[in-house]
Image (cartoon, helix red, strand yellow):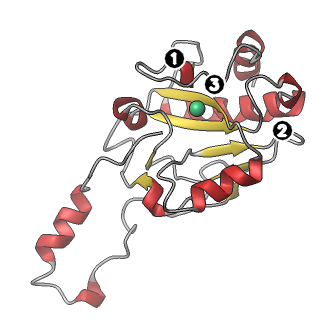
């Protein structure tokens, strides 16, 4: 979780320089040309984060994506969505997976930079997945959550050419400089990586 770094996309800069010459109505929509808002993952529900909580980009053209970062929410699934919708929270992740049934929401397009890693370099290069639960309550880590999350991570790795191994699928606690411990000692990495590779 960290503050936004001011970031001007090339598109915005171009729009700015064009303003004097082009009638406003002819300017493209805010996102036109980058990507269409909506889920990248076909099984995800689209529950967008407030745009104040992430940075627009045009990945992978603007920044290569080579990490998936695994998180645990430390609050409920629904509250996580509310936090991401609140422009004062300055935090987001691309996906949130629900414990009871694996239901998955996408909150930030994969082309954009979610604010989840607490480290700008890792935000730039990663997709963040939040899992409903608490690091000290292993009962939240259900079979269906592992399985649906593994399918999601496998699809992300396929889309971005990310190796399906522990060097590239990492926990939040492995981000340099973080004081976060998620997903914690009860997260079964051996099982998770096996599931990701079995897809
Ligand atoms: Zn985290």
- Residue 28, given in percent of the width and then of the height, sits at 32, 76
Identify the residue shown where x is 20% and y is 71%: 15
Could you tell which of marks 3 and 1 lies nearer the N-terminus? 1
- Whether disc 3's CB lies below 8 Å from ligand 1 is answered yes
Q: Tell me the number on the disc at residue 174.
A: 1
Vertical placement of 103 versus 30: above or below? above
The mark nearer the N terminus, 2 or 3, is 2
Could you say which quadrant of the image residue 31 lies in?
bottom left
Task: Report if the beta carbon of the residue with label 1 is closer than 8 angstroms to ligand 1.
Answer: no
* Badge 2 element: loop
Q: Are marks 2 and 1 in contact (CB under 8 Å)?
A: no
Residue drawn at x 31%, y 44% is 62
Q: Measured from the top left, where is residue 76 in percent x and y?
A: 77, 46
- Distance between mark 2 and mark 1 Cα atoms: 23 Å
Q: Circle 3 sits in a helix, a strand or a loop, which is it? A: loop
Alpha-carbon span between mark 2 and mark 3: 15 Å
Left/right placement of residue 162 relative to residue 186 reads left
Q: Does residue 67 appear in the picture of this structure?
A: yes
- Secondary structure at numbered mark 1: helix
Going from N to C along the chain, the mark reached first, 2 or 1, is 2
What residue did someone put label 2 on? 99
- Name the residue furthest top: 190
């Amino acid at each position: 979780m960290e503050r936004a770094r001011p970031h001007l996309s090339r598109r915005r800069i171009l729009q700015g320089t064009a303003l004097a010459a082009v009638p406003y109505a002819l300017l493209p929509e805010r996102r036109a040309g980058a990507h269409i808002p909506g889920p990248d993952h076909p099984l995800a529900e689209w529950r967008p984060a407030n745009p104040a909580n992430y940075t627009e980009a045009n990945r992978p053209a603007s920044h290569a994506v080579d990490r998936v970062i695994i998180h645990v929410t430390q609050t409920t699934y629904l509250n996580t969505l509310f936090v991401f919708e609140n422009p004062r929270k300055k935090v987001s992740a691309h996906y949130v997976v629900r414990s009871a049934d694996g239901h998955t929401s996408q909150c930030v397009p994969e082309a954009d930079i979610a604010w989840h890693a607490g480290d700008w370099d890792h935000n730039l290069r990663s997709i963040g997945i939040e899992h409903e639960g608490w690091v000290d309550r292993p009962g939240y880590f259900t079979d269906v959550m592992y399985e649906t999350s593994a399918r999601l991570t496998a699809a992300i790795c396929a889309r971005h050419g990310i190796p399906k191994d522990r060097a590239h699928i990492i926990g939040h606690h492995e981000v340099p400089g973080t004081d976060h411990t998620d997903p914690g000692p009860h997260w079964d990495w051996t099982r998770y990586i096996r599931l990701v590779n079995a897809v």
